[in-house]
Image: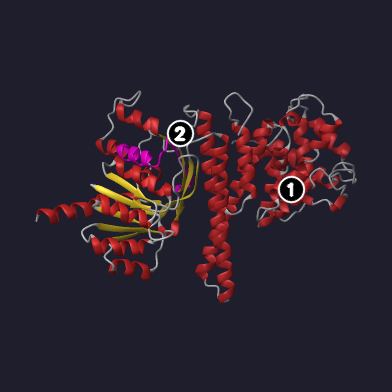
Amino acid sequence: MNTSGTNGFQNQKALHDAAKIMVRVRNPRRLLRMIVSLIDREIGLTHASFLIYERKKSRYIFVDSRGTHRIPIQLIRLDDTNPLIRWFSQKGPKSFRRDCLTYESLCDWLTRPLAGQNVEPSETLRAQWLDLKDVMRTLRASVCVPGHYKDELLGVVILGEKLNGAPFTPAEISFFQTLASDASMALKTAAFQDDVIKMNRELTEQQKLSEEHIKEIAALRKKEQETYYEIVMSLAQEVYAKDPYTSRHLQGVERLGLMTAEEMGYDLSGRRKDILVASLHLHDVGKIGIPDRILMKPAALTDEEWKVMRLHPEKGAKILSPLSGFQDVAEIVLHHHERFDGTGYPHRKRGEHIPFEARIIAVVDAFHAIVSERCYKKGHPVEKAYRELKRCAGSQFDPGVVEAFIRVHKRLMDENGRAQTMPSVTS
Amino acid sequence: MKLLIVDDEVEICDFLKSFFEERDYEVVTANSGEAALEIVKKIRPQVVLLDIKMPGMNGVRVLEEIKQKFPRIKVIMVTAIETRDKIEECLRLGADNYITKPLSLEYLENDVREKIEGLKNTLLS
């Protein structure tokens, strides 16, 4: 149970816990069970349950339910035709939120005309609400939050009432929404990976590759790649939530890193590009494990605090390495604070022994830190950043990377009419 | 409309009990085959929802007993067991339906209502 904060609930902390669960747990059902127990632990509820889609049988079943009034999970299923499933699956009138359903709002809709609208709800809509109310009552639900992937409804988080009887706060609702959508994404990724593995195995057995299969696999790989990217970005958001100034330059960091690698003749086809992009975004993922009092400290850190801070590459690698497809990224994350002259941490690797991607990250990250306005110092102009990079080339940084980076950055600045210090960011 | 729910899992009994009570059924529950037969003798429910896998007397034997002594009582098997043999055995012993868990509550309620209405019709004719 949470002890800090007046409302007994720290959204941000809980989300970080959830993010950690997501990266560590590969088995999707286990992941969902851990999320349900996280909700149960963070906010005392009469019950917290998770419904997931079982595609083979076109039905939704419970993977877990916890709390004093938990639902017997083996007993019931919800078919495609169930009002709750239909509500979250279809696109209806815009005036009703389909990203969350509370029993309270349902009762509101049924008893009074819509706020700010003169339109009376149609009879079919009212009938739908009555059915929904019935389902929610049966499921002892006061909040239902859907988890979509693209337009497909993959799961629903179903929650009872709070044990203390208080209503849910908007922060809590948005916490559930984040969990539901992250969990759906994780489910989808796991499903794709299983599909790809299964298909590969079948194909090897048959030793016969029909055109159709190849196309199908290519499509799956593409989807897998997209999902991989989404996971990277969602994790990166968790890191940036701790260190908000960074997030504005998300796209910039990625573009600069990729262009520098390209400038140096690095082959960016296939997985190599994914690995570099993931590393650029996730190199600080270990900061999730560093206490806020150190991370957010507005003054200089003490020796002890630095010791803790310097653990973040190892923590990051530890978070990433169990996740399939992230082993290379973990290795790069581990070494992004090594120095070219071999005096960095954690392993005092030197020169070419440091992974190429890690050497790129060191430069992009340092440049970014110099030009950004950090909490403890004012932003520096670009020219000064160039000078600083050049001064440390050969000691801290790979001189080849520094050169390539500055060339690329100057070119980008010219293209952007020197309006921005980092390449344009649209997100 | 008297309904008896038999399942060794108390949670399942409680869940189904409140579901049917909200729909105006009179519901009694039993957590074992033996207890179920006692209740059947005493209150003569119209419909029995019967789990198969229970410690002690299992659902198939309960079904057999009920159908021998009270053939008019409708018995719906509600179970996680999905084997063809078991389904055929239950139907041969007179089960009126065989529903596998996880089940759709809508379907279950419709079936119970149908059975009760069927009983009413036979009484009237």
Whole-percent x, y for residue A184 in the image: 52, 47
Residue nearest the observer in this picture, A190 or A278 = A190
Same chain for the residues at labels 1 and 2, yes or no? yes
Q: Any mark on residue B110, and which? A: none
Assign a secondary structure to mark 2: loop
Residue type at tag 1 = Ala
Output the chain of dot 2.
A
Dot 1 falls on a residue whose secondary structure is helix
Q: Nearer the viewer, residue A157 or B65?
A: B65
Determine the CA span between mark 1 and mark 2. 39 Å
At x 30%, y 65%, the residue is B64
Residue A424 position in % (x across, y down): 64, 36
Q: Is residue A416 visible?
A: no
Vertical arrangement, residue A252 with respect to residue A318, above or below: above
Q: Where residue A406 sits in the image (x, y, percent)?
A: 79, 40
Q: Nearer the viewer, residue B7 or A375?
A: B7
Residue occupied by mark 2? A161
User: Magenta residues?
Assistant: A129-153
Which residue is labeled 1 in the image? A317
Residue A141 lies in the magenta-colored region: yes
The amino acid on which the numbered mark 2 sits, given as a three-letter code, is: Glu
Quarter of the image for the C terminus of chain B: give it: bottom left
Residue A207 located left or right of residue A285: left
The image quarter containing residue A254 is top right
Mark sitting earlier along the chain (1/2): 2
How crowded is the residue under tag 2: few (<14 C-alpha within 10 Å), some, or many (20+)? many
B29 within the magenta span:
no
Chain name for mark 1:
A
**From this viewpoint, is residue A418 visible?**
yes
The residue at the point 42 percent across, 35 percent down is: A142
Category of crowding for the residue at label 1, using alpha-carbon neighbours closer than 10 angstroms: few (below 14), some (14–19), many (at least 20)? many
